[in-house]
Amino acid sequence: MTYEDLILKESVMRRVRFICFLRSNTSVFAFKFGLAAVFLIAGSFFVSITNVFNNMPSVFEVGQFANFFMYAFLKTEIVTQIILLGVLATLPYIYRDVSKVFRGGSRQLASA
């Protein structure tokens, strides 16, 4: 084997070991939950959560509550809208994984 072959072999094996480590030590649920957390943390840099809660109407006033959030969503910057849509896109997948556990379909949260 030449020196270049040894370097290539070591590079390939390093990638193989890394992928095996990830597959054995992580779950899809952890990735989805982490992705939603990243979106929420990123959103907190653009939106003052305390001001939103101070300004929003009561939850029991359904019409005003819906109008408040619709108007707030439409009047925010595009970055904030993308972050919120990212959170909303990950929620159904997280719900699906958690509901599988509670239905008894699996004792483990979506490992693959």
Image (spheres, rainbow, N blue to C red):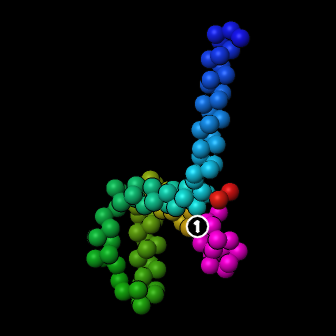
In this picture, residue 38 sits left or right of residue 19: left
Give the labeled residue for mark 1. 94
- Identified by mark 1, the residue type is Ile
Residue 82 position within the rendered picture, expressed as x and y whole percent measured from the top left: 50, 56
Q: Which residue is painted at 44% across and 78% down in the image?
A: 67
Q: Quadrant of residue 29?
A: bottom right
Q: Which residue is painted at 43% across and 74% down in the image?
A: 69
Q: Nearer the viewer, residue 101 or 56?
A: 101
Is 100 magenta? The answer is yes
Residue 25 position within the rendered picture, expressed as x and y whole percent measured from the top left: 57, 51
Q: Quadrant of residue 64?
A: bottom left
Is 13 magenta? The answer is no
Considering only vertical position in the picture, is 63 above or below 42?
below
- Residue situated furthest bottom in the rendering: 60
Residue 24 position within the rendered picture, expressed as x and y whole percent measured from the top left: 62, 50
Residue 105 position within the rendered picture, expressed as x and y whole percent measured from the top left: 71, 74
- The local crowd at label 1, few if under 14, some if 14 to 19, many if 20 or more residues have their Cα within 10 Å, is some
Q: Nearer the viewer, residue 82 or 23?
A: 23
Quadrant that contains the C terminus: bottom right
In the rendered structure, which segment of residues is drawn in magenta?
92-110
Q: Which residue is painted at 45% across and 60% down in the image?
A: 37
Q: Which residue is painted at 46% across and 72% down in the image?
A: 70
- The secondary structure type at the circle numbered 1 is helix
Q: Nearer the viewer, residue 3 or 65?
A: 3
- Looking at the image, how many numbered discs can be counted on the residues? 1
Q: Quadrant of residue 109?
A: bottom right
Quadrant that contains the N terminus: top right
Considering only vertical position in the picture, is 13 above or below 73?
above
Considering only vertical position in the picture, is 103 above or below 29?
below
Q: Nearer the viewer, residue 63 or 39?
A: 39
- Residue situated furthest top in the rendering: 2
